[in-house]
Image (cartoon, rainbow, N blue to C red):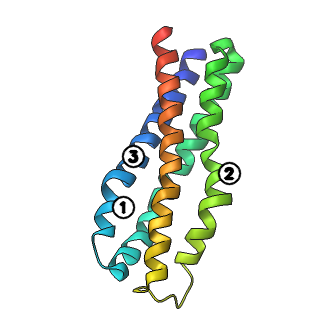
Amino acid sequence: MLHAAQFVAVFCCTVFAGAALYINLVEHPARMDCDTKTAVTVWAPSYKRATMMQAPLAILSFSAGVSAWLLDGGIMWVIGAVLIGLVVPFTFLVIMPTNHQLLIPGRDLASGETRALLEKWGKLHAVRTVLGLLASGIYVIELLKA
């Protein structure tokens, strides 16, 4: 049971971190190279689709990491779990207000304010990426120790 929990924790976390890193290094910079109206128009469906992928991955990785810890996997499993788990409240409390502002009906999609919100969103999303990468690193190191 311990090995199954560790596998799920590592798999879900590394997939999450890889997707988050791709968003920060490739997808968001590419859309920011476009005019603001195009960038925000592309951001909206991308954000919705990424949410459907990344939220379950973070929650599963957190749950599996806690399970690995409870199954005597060691304290580092719960530390990794907490790090990946933090992306959920961070998203709701810190990123969602920016998301909601970007999605306001009637927003001037070409405005400087919209551009600034997209830039802010990229920086905030980078926090999720760092949390995912840190948790992945901890999980992989622990897995290699076993």
Residue at mark 1? 28
Q: Mark 2 belongs to which amino acid?
A: Pro
In terms of sequence position, does the residue under pointer 2 or pointer 3 come before the other? 3
Please, is residue 51 above or below residue 100 in the view? Answer: above
Whether residue 1 can be seen here: no
Q: Tag 3: residue type?
A: Leu
Specify which label sits upstream in the sequence, 2 or 1.
1
- Does the rendering let one see residue 74? yes
Q: Mark 2, residues whose alpha carbon is within 10 Å: few (<14), some, or many (≥20)?
A: few
User: In the orientation shown, which residue stands out farthest toward the top?
Assistant: 146
Up the image or down, 70 lies above or below 106; here it is above
Kind of element beneath mark 1 = helix
Q: Quadrant of residue 122?
A: bottom left
Residue 24's x, y, as percent?
39, 53
Q: CA distance from mark 2 to mark 3?
A: 19 Å
Q: Which element carries disc 2, helix, strand or loop? A: helix
Residue drawn at the location 63% of the way across and 40% of the way down: 85
Position of 141 with respect to 26 (left or right) is right
Q: Amino acid at mark 1?
A: His
* Cα distance in 3D space between marks 3 and 1: 10 Å
10 Å crowding of disc 1: few (<14), some (14-19), many (20+): many
Residue at image location 30% in from the left, 79% down from the top: 35
Q: Residues within 10 Å of mark 3 (few under 14, many from 20)?
A: some
Residue 128 place in picture, x, y as percent:
53, 48
Mark 3 element type: helix
Q: Which residue is mark 3?
A: 21
Question: Residue 6: which numbered mark, if any?
Answer: none
* Tag of residue 89: 2
**Mark 2 in CB contact with mark 3 (< 8 angstroms):** no
Place residue 112 in its image quadrant: bottom left
